[in-house]
Every structure is written in C-alpha cells, then in structure tokens.
C-alpha cells in the first residue's frame, strides 16, 4: 500500500449532507491509512446553484456530479463521494465507480409539524417533494393531496416546511438519519408503498478511470451486498432509460447470495402504474435489473414512458 506517504483529496458538494458523506469516507480512509493526509475539496455544483426549477426540467441528476468529475479529470481530487441516487445511469467516458458503501435506511420519510402520517392529511393538503417518483406514488395512493415542487438542500426543505409552505414534505430517510435529524421523521413509508429511488441510501465513490492505483486503496470501503443491489437497480433503470424526468423506482434486497427486487414505472399523476418483482443471483445483478425492465415493458412501461415524453 503506497498511500501511506501521500495525500488523498475527496471532492464533495458543500451541502451539509454531502459534507457529512465526505467526512464519513474521510474518517474511514484515515482509519485505514493513518499516515496519509485525507483532505476534502468542497465545491458548488450547477444543481446547487439553480434552485428555482424542478430538477427534471433543468437537466437532471448529472447537475450534482459534473463539477466533481471535472476535479477528478484534472487531478485536483482523487475521488468524489456521491449519493448513488444522484449518479446518472451511465457514467461519462473516463470515470469509474470504485466502491459502493453499506446502505443506510432506503425508505422515504414523511415529515410534518402537524400530522403523524400521510393517512392523516386532510383533502387538499400541500405535500412538498422534488421527485416525480414520489409524486406519482403519492398521487396513486392519495389523489386528494396537492403535490408541489420542493427544491433545495435538506435544511432549506425543512425550513420551508417550518415556515408553513407545506403541510408535509417527503424526504429520503437516509439523509435525515445521517444528519442526526431522525426526530423530524413522523413516519417511515414502507418500500412497498413508496418504492425508493435507484441507489437511495447508498454512497458511491467515483474515480478517474485512469487512476487504477485508487482501486486497491478504496476496495475496503466497498460493501458487496449493497453494491450488488445497487447494480441491479441501476440495471433496471438503465434498460428503461431512467432519469429524474421519469417516475420510476427500484428496490433490491440481498438474502444471502440472492437478490429480490421490486420496480415500477408510472405516469406523473399516478393513474397509470406498472409494478413487478424478480429474484435471482447476486452474481447476475445487472442482468436481473434488465430482466425486471423487460417484465415492466411487457406490462406497458414503454407506453407510459412514451406518453411522458409528449408532455
């Protein structure tokens, strides 16, 4: 291991959650390589700057990743830490995912100052979410609720709730747990009721593909079961050309050397939805995702996706 004498630089967004994630990886690396200096390079991304439009409209998830990749490309950073749900399904040429960390709680969380659960919300209540995936599933279950766009980092979203702009907001439980804000969660929404985003709750570590030296350094951070589950989920989304402009989700769980995965595709209003399950070997994770995509297509996923493109 030749990292003992060198420095490792981690590129990260500057939001509180992104910095928590970067510091978490920094601490893990520091423990593994005590003689190495591990630093964080904080950056503001386009996705952090444009806050007045829904993500789907301004170019999707890659907006949170591009600047970090630039730092990897020009050698200012050795690795970048991402929420896997923010990583586009196809990495640009020249980049590689070196490790996927163990998954935190993948569920969506119901956050409200007045109500204990989604079931308690009166007709016409305004629920905030930036995700078409959450919106479609909420509208399918609760057509009487009003869903409005909610952008900004975690603290901004909570502040908007506290100011009374929303009766409730839906967030990823993982972010709240990581920032010690678990007490804000009124209800964890079952993965059967709100199928999570692809990769939700998992951290990915990206490198410049030419930096093969980093693979061995980062190998101890890879959590094989999480990596297999995320690979399966991304396989499904990739096969369906998923992005945050499309209401789809997938959730895989490992049981020994088997993966069980549920996926769905829906119209934004939740009136059309197809859902299916598959089970198979962790060694065939990507193929399992493709199989699930094929099953969803057989149920009519392509028609739903085609109708979204005309909007």
Image: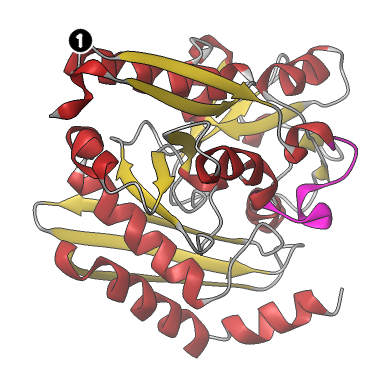
Q: Is residue 257 rendered magenta in the image?
A: no
On whether residue 59 falls in the magenta region, the answer is yes
How many numbered marks are there?
A: 1
Q: What residue is drawn where x is 72% and y is 18%?
A: 158
Disc 1 packing (10 Å; few <14; some 14–19; many ≥20): some
Question: What stretch of residues is rendered in magenta?
Answer: 50-61
* Percent coordinates x, y for residue 87 in the rendering: 53, 50
* Quadrant for the N terminus in the image: top left
Quadrant of res 172: top right
| Callout 1: SS | loop
Quarter occupied by residue 102: top left
Would residue 197 be found to the left or right of residue 205 on screen? right
* Residue drawn at 43 percent across, 24 percent down: 9
Question: In this view of the protein, can residue 186 be seen by the observer?
Answer: no
Residue closest to the eye, 83 or 128: 83
Residue at (52% x, 25% y) in the render: 175
- Asked which quadrant contains residue 274, the reply is bottom right
State the residue in front, 105 or 92.
92
Q: Is residue 241 above or below residue 104?
A: below
Relative placement, left or right, of 173 versus 224 is right
Quarter of the image with the C terminus is: bottom right
Q: Position of residue 42 (x, y in %)?
A: 60, 21
Q: Position of residue 294 (x, y in %)?
A: 43, 84
Residue 294 in sight: yes
Residue 275 point in image, percent of width and height: 48, 70
Reading the image, the residue beneath label 1 is 34
Residue appearing at x 32%, y 46% in the figure: 98
């Amino acid at each position: 291991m030749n990292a003992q004498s060198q420095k490792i630089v981690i590129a990260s967004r500057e939001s509180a959650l992104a910095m928590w994630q970067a510091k978490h990886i920094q601490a893990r690396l520091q423990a593994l390589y005590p003689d190495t200096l591990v630093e964080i390079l904080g950056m503001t991304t386009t996705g952090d700057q444009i806050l007045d439009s829904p993500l789907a409209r301004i170019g999707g998830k890659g907006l949170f990743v591009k600047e970090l990749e630039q730092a990897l490309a020009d050698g200012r950073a050795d690795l970048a830490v991402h929420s896997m749900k923010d990583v586009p399904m196809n990495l640009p040429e020249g980049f590689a995912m070196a490790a996927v960390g163990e998954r935190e709680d993948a569920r969506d969380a119901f956050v409200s100052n007045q109500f204990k659960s989604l079931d308690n919300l009166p007709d016409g209540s305004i629920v905030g979410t930036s995700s078409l995936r959450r919106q479609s599933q909420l509208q399918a279950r609760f057509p009487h609720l009003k869903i409005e766009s909610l952008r900004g980092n975690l603290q901004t979203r909570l502040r908007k709730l506290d100011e009374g702009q929303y009766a409730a907001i839906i967030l990823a439980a993982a972010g709240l747990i990581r920032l010690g804000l678990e007490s804000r969660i009124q209800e964890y929404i079952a993965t059967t009721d709100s199928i999570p985003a692809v990769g939700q709750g998992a951290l990915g570590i990206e490198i410049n593909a030419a930096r093969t030296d980093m693979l061995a350094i980062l190998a101890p951070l890879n959590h094989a079961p999480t990596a297999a589950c995320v690979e399966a989920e991304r396989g499904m989304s990739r096969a369906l050309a998923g992005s945050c402009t499309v209401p789809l989700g997938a959730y895989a769980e490992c049981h020994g050397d088997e993966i069980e995965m549920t996926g769905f595709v829906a119209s934004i209003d939740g009136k059309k939805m197809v859902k299916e399950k598959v089970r198979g070997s962790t060694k065939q994770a990507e193929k399992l995702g493709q199989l699930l995509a094929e099953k969803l297509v057989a149920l009519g996923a392509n028609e739903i996706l085609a109708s979204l493109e005309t909007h």
